[in-house]
Image (cartoon, rainbow, N blue to C red):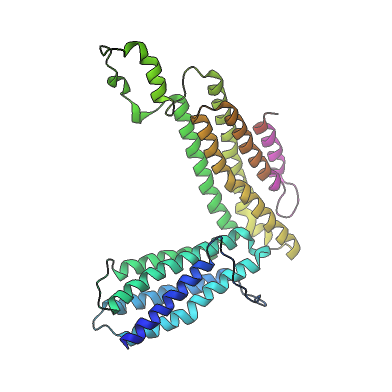
Amino acid sequence: MADALDSLLTTTLHRLKEFAAFLTPTATSPLTQPIDEPPNPLHVLRDAALLVKAHTTKLSLLAINKPFTPSAIAKVLRQLSAEALPALMSAVQICQQERSTYGTMMAAEAQARVRRVFREMESLLQEIQSLAQGETSNKSTLTSTGVVWEACDALILLEKLGVGGLAVQKAEQWRDTIKDAIEELREWAAGEDEENEGFDTLLDENDEAVEGDRDSVEDLFNAANSLPKDRPELRTLVEEADGRLKKVVLLYTAVLKRRLKTFDAGTKDLAVEEREKAVRRMDEAMENLQRIPHQIDELAACFYDLDEAKSKAGLEKCVKEAVAASTVMAKGWNGQTDEFTAWSVKWRAAVEGV
């Protein structure tokens, strides 16, 4: 029985590795037949994740309790491999197949979260295999089970969030990232560099050749840590960027309130074609909103390099991306104009400085 368990563990680990490889973002999806009349994939993810939690808990307890019983572990492992693992893969396939219903964002998120479950399960089974072979494990199987549970809970959460809830979660994270970037840029412009406070103490006025070179040495030392005093045009540009990027943050807040948080309720009664159109709009807007934090990081790097031309171009790129998102989100999910539509026109004029 010990040999049979070891063989089963090896086979299951190989299967998990294959599944995880299929779910990498750059992997080519295996050829599979479309699933006719597919169930709600978010429900499948939830139910399969609950199964994984139950089976991994049993496996962990069986592995640490004496006597070690290979037959009992093998029975649970077969159930896990036959039921939960295929269900998770099927759910990912349905999300991809039904992107017009669940969106590209949800499909990608389901794929990433299922892949994490497989990777964490792989770690747990490797530890159980070590115990089965009489070896000592570096980690407790209960600890590894807890990590598997955490990954499964992330899958269960997808069903609770839905398409709109996931969009809200993502957009709030991106907005917070932008806020942090704006604050860092503001501190840099103001010269609030706490890490290098007291630099003057390194320059003793009595040291030879220091007094005459003090300004140039300080400029060199602080170039990447604060905005030089002799760059008024760049300072003006930083102030402009601060004001316009704060308006970008305001757009995130408005889109969250008026569009993303109303998606599920605002689309549930739409005809199939209209809802699919709304899903496409959601995906397009989320791609815009996702790119902006990265563009702002690039913009900040241009400022820190004291490159005025690239900073101007980077700022316009950020604003253009935000305007694109506002344009996609201008009308309500039913295709009609509303308060946000009128607000977005005024916001665009303000952020573009028209």
Please give the range of residues in magenta: 327-349
Quick check: 291 left or right of 268? left
The question of residue 267 being in magenta is answered with: no
Identity of the residue drawn at 53% across and 46% down: 174
Q: What x and y, as percent, mark residue 45?
A: 53, 70
Q: Quadrant of residue 134?
A: bottom left
- Position of 320 relative to 100 (above/below): above
User: Foreground residue, 305 or 51?
Assistant: 305
Q: What x and y, as percent, mark residue 226?
A: 44, 26
Q: What x and y, as percent, mark residue 278?
A: 70, 57
Q: Is residue 152 visible?
A: no
Q: How many marks?
A: 0
Quadrant of the rendering where the N terminus is positioned:
bottom left
Q: Quadrant of residue 321?
A: top right
Q: What x and y, as percent, mark residue 284?
A: 66, 52
- Position of 99 relative to 246 (above/below): below
Q: Quadrant of residue 267?
A: bottom right
Quick check: 163 left or right of 15? right
User: Foreground residue, 172 or 207?
Assistant: 207
Identity of the residue drawn at 58% across and 43% down: 292
- Position of 262 relative to 71 (above/below): above
- Position of 232 relative to 121 (above/below): above
The question of residue 345 being in magenta is answered with: yes
Quadrant of the rendering where the C terminus is positioned:
top right
Q: Is residue 350 visible?
A: yes
Identity of the residue drawn at 47% across and 75% down: 15
User: Foreground residue, 191 or 119?
Assistant: 119
